[in-house]
Image: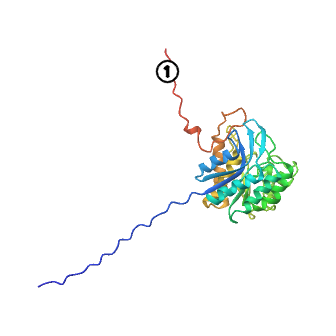
Amino acid sequence: MLLAARHFVSRPVPSEPVRQPRPIPRVLSIAGSDSGGGAGIQADLKAFAASGVHGMTAVTAITAQNTVGVTAVHQVPPETIIAQVRAVSCDIGIDAVKIGMLGTVATVEAVANALDELPDRTPVVLDPVMVAESGAELLAPPARAALIELLLPRATVVTPNVAEARALLSVPRSVARGGDDRDVAALARAVRELGPKFVVVTGGHRERAIDVFFDGGAVVELGGERYPDGAGHGSGCTHSAVLAARLAWGDSPLTAARRAKRLASKAVRDGLAELGSGAGPVDVLGIARRRPAVRQNPQCQ
């Protein structure tokens, strides 16, 4: 007896979905150059690399600078600043912007015009750099007014230290240098009234190394340790650059501020205090940890 042939229909085995690699975020630093490599665009590029993003620059000023001080400043022409932003925007693209040293009214206006050409939702982190670690003034008083009028309302996050927050608000120095918690919270609230969506008053120059985050609702304190034996040149640049990088990765502003605080503090702790005779640069890349040990020659008895 013959059995009827059975026909089997082969069905394709479902395959695993192909996972595409996540695009690398692209972050632009609009800031000055530090010839000593500790702050400015040099610090920003190192912070971007440590955060896993592709860093780009639009240089606003060239400084002759080291760990001791700033001896010369050359402002980049406004049209060249705008050209730098356009060059990277039209080809590579920009997922977030960090703004640092500006210096003059013309530079502030150029940066404002450049931001107008970017997509509306591009996150902008503004670090209102006014005074270098050495004490040199980096933002002329007229430029301060232009920054308040033209850039603060465009900022997603602004990251002044206590002294910079006071300067933005023209608060007299009757407010203590460190300020108690209520003073700093009040400063954060008042700075937000100037237009930025979020404010982080950094605590690097306070007696307690606490950042204050304010989003229009509750004030959030971001605690951290102080490292008096570390090196802090470029800590503010590093903090704001990491914050911009984390926003480019998609973090919320509060999460980005927490991560920026943590990484900047670690960079100060590991700072390269041995470099130069002034405030040494922070070490966000862990250079010191990767330094090979010096082989000691055995001593003959």
**Is residue 123 shown to the viewer in this render?**
yes
**Is residue 224 shown to the viewer in this render?**
no
Write the residue at 38% across / 71% down. Answer: 14
Query: Left or right of 43: which side holds 191?
Result: right
Quick one: which residue is furthest to the top in this view?
A: 301
Write the residue at 82% across / 50% down. Answer: 104
Write down the quadrant of residue 70 in the picture.
top right
Residue occupied by mark 1: 298
Write the residue at 64% across / 48% down. Answer: 45
Percent position (x, y) of residue 111? 75, 56
Quick one: which residue is furthest to the left in this view?
A: 1
Along the viewing direction, whichever of 101 and 204 lies nearer the viewer = 101
Percent position (x, y) of residue 38? 68, 41
Which secondary structure lies at badge 1? loop
Tell me which colouring the rendered structure shows. Answer: rainbow
Percent position (x, y) of residue 216? 75, 64
Quadrant in which the N terminus appears: bottom left
- The tally of labels here is 1
Query: Left or right of 241: which side holds 189?
Result: right
Along the viewing direction, whichever of 278 and 2 lies nearer the viewer = 2
Percent position (x, y) of residue 190? 82, 59
Query: Left or right of 282: which side holds 196?
Result: right
Circle 1 Cα neighbour tier, 10 Å, few/some/many (<14 / 14–19 / ≥20) = few
Along the viewing direction, whichever of 182 and 295 lies nearer the viewer = 295
Residue type at mark 1 is Pro
Indicate whether 139 appears above or below 155: above
Along the viewing direction, whichever of 220 and 234 lies nearer the viewer = 234
Indicate whether 275 appears above or below 83: above
